[in-house]
Image (cartoon, coloured by chain):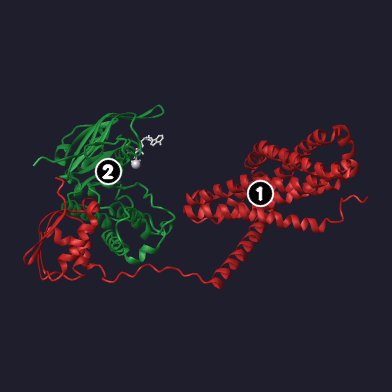
Chain colours: A green, B red
Amino acid sequence: MSRQTVIELDGVCTRFGGNTVHRDLDLCVKEGQIVGLLGGSGSGKTTLLREILGLHRPDAGVVRLFGVDLNDPDIRVQRNIRRRLGMLFQHGALFSALSVYDNIAFPLRELRCLDEDWIRRLVHLKLAMVGLGVSHGKLMPAELSGGMVKRVALARALALEPELLLLDEPTAGLDPDRSQNFVELIGELQRELGLTVVMVTHDLNTLAGLASHVAILADRRIIAYGTRSEIMTIDHPFVTGFFGADRRKLL
Amino acid sequence: MNDRPSLHVEPGKVVLSGAWTLAEMLPRLAELQAGLAAATDGNRQWDLSALTRLDSAAAVLLWRAWQATWPVSLEIGDMHRRIVERVAELPQEMPPPPVARVHLPEFIGRYLLKAAANLRGMIALFGQLILDTFFLLRHPRDIPWREFTANVYKAGALALPVTALVGFLIGVTISYLSALQLKSFGADLFIVNILGISIIRELGPVLVAVLVAGRSGSAMTAQIGVMRVTEEIDALSTMGISRSIRVVLPKIVGLTVAMPLLVLWTSAVAMFGGMLAALLQLDLSLVYFLENLPRVVPVSNLYIGLGKGFVFGFVIALVACYFGLHVKPNTESLSANTTSAVVTAITTVILVDAIFAVFTRQVGVPHL
Ligand SMILES: Nc1ncnc2c1ncn2[C@@H]1O[C@H](COP(=O)(O)OP(=O)(O)OP(=O)(O)O)[C@@H](O)[C@H]1O
Ligand SMILES: [Mg+2]
């Protein structure tokens, strides 16, 4: 069966002042893929995710999600698209004035359709998924450790059962055990729900355990995009430098 | 593949099909819930093998419809069974988060305790400032001149236009209203006394204090508060830089120095506005006004006004810094503390003003 295209970037250019971050960048992600986005620090990975989310408008080019242009003026279309995606921000971006419980419940309450009992069960389910207990729900974001912030943010990103999940360095700050759990969780969700995932990561284990495809952002564009084994054969200074002697590990 | 979630009741069993996901369910939620509730009665056989997708929101819905027990017979794919199992593993009774009930005495008590704690904290901050001052006297090289002058500029120089505008308008208003009254008594000349005493002694300092509390006080609280939220204050202490010397002291000293100057400036502009109004309303010449002012308004009034400015500046900055340092790292606390800082500063200023009035009641009032 032909798979639906979820993300389509076409000729995206981004400039901050005189600093060109993306030039003529193309990317096409199909349904059900788990894409690891690799690139050096400051190469514009976070910016790319923000463009996919529609938080930042590229200077040129088109971003299409589920076949809908993000510049579509209809607010309802925009809102429905947004509800189909979840984002884990690099620094969590939890609402600092709300407790962990309320942070996760917030997007659910915003739907204005679910009753409190339903929301409560869902919140506890998501908390359990990311390995947090009921007692953590009462804490405020400022009272969490860095890794816990990541996990709560992931729980919040999962709250609306998104079809497309964008993760910015999901396992940075987690211990190896938790990263392994995380890899298993996302893998399981992907199989159960057919999620599409785009994740920025520098962690080879996460990449090896999870990613079905790898996209490499270097020289201001996606220089390579393909399955893991295809990427291994690429001869580019960034790829050689990034994987170094660990090339085997990915396969 | 937009397959909508649907539910049929066949003889003896309930068949679900389509994608049971939150997004697909939302448009027809009421219908599905009613369908599930109706289907549950007496039906213990469920066929979920035709589901294309099942997410945890739908699993929770099903589990609630089954009243938290597995149906007698259930046909479901392995993947989807895992999802329902996850829901089943949750504790059945979810206690709602406790809602804090507020009792009046408790509320008042807590309020008073908080006020007492704030007072204590401000006294402690004051003590810290005195210690810092001694430290700086012994180590003059550590005096933060740049921060100090920056604060004088921000809180003082940049506030000149707005205080002038407000002062001028208030001067005009008071002069105009008084002139109307005085004219009917034929006591035109007393306009000089009224304007001089009221503006120089009372209105100038209080007016500036209210403006500065809203302008600079809130800015100080917000700045220190955000530095706390983003852990910049902690970064400073890690570098061995004292937050009280670098951040708090320059703000307090800066405002304490700038305020008397602002008061002088505002009072002067307000007097000017009053003089203009008197000229238009009562034909009182500017020269007459200026010649009589020193005679009917003893110079001690000016000293009292400047003294008030000095104290008010100190109070506003102290309160603002105190509340800034007590911001908890979240946005709600930031806004609450900024509000508290401005309200407390203005209240304290008025309180101090009353104390001033009591203790200086013998000073500077001309006896006719
Ligand atoms: N709002 C902004 N204004 C100006 N420049 C920006 C802005 N956001 C990002 N940049 C610049 O764009 C470039 C890419 O930033 P980005 O945050 O996307 O990097 P990244 O690939 O996510 O890096 P890292 O792996 O370190 O998170 C950087 O050079 C950065 O300085
Ligand atoms: Mg980044």
Mark 1 CB near ligand 1 (8 Å cut): no
Q: Which mark is residue A66?
A: none
The x and y percentages for residue B140 are 68, 46
Residue that sits furthest to the right in the current view: B368
Against A19, residue B249 (above or below) is below
**Badge 1: how crowded within 10 Å, few (<14), some, or many (20+)?**
many
Query: Could you say which is closer to the camera, residue B358 or residue A194?
Result: B358
Mark 1 belongs to chain: B
The image quadrant where one finds ligand 1 is top left
Residue that sits furthest to the front in the current view: B184
Q: State which mark lies toward you, 1 or 2.
A: 2
Against A129, residue B259 (above or below) is above
Q: Amino acid at mark 1?
A: Ile
The x and y percentages for residue A114 are 29, 58
Against B42, residue A170 (above or below) is above
Residue drawn 53% across the image and 55% down it: B336
Q: Quadrant of residue B63?
A: bottom left
Distance in Å between CA atoms under marks 1 and 2: 51 Å
The x and y percentages for residue B272 are 78, 36
Give SS at disc 2: helix
Give the labeled residue for mark 1. Answer: B252
Against A56, residue B19 (above or below) is below
Mark 2 CB near ligand 1 (8 Å cut): no
Q: Amino acid at mark 2?
A: Ile
Give the labeled residue for mark 2. Answer: A81
Give SS at disc 1: helix
Residue that sits furthest to the left in the current view: B11
Residue B111 placement, left or right of A159: right
Q: Residue B96: tell me if it is visible.
A: yes
**Badge 2: how crowded within 10 Å, few (<14), some, or many (20+)?**
some
Mark 2 belongs to chain: A
The x and y percentages for residue B157 are 67, 37
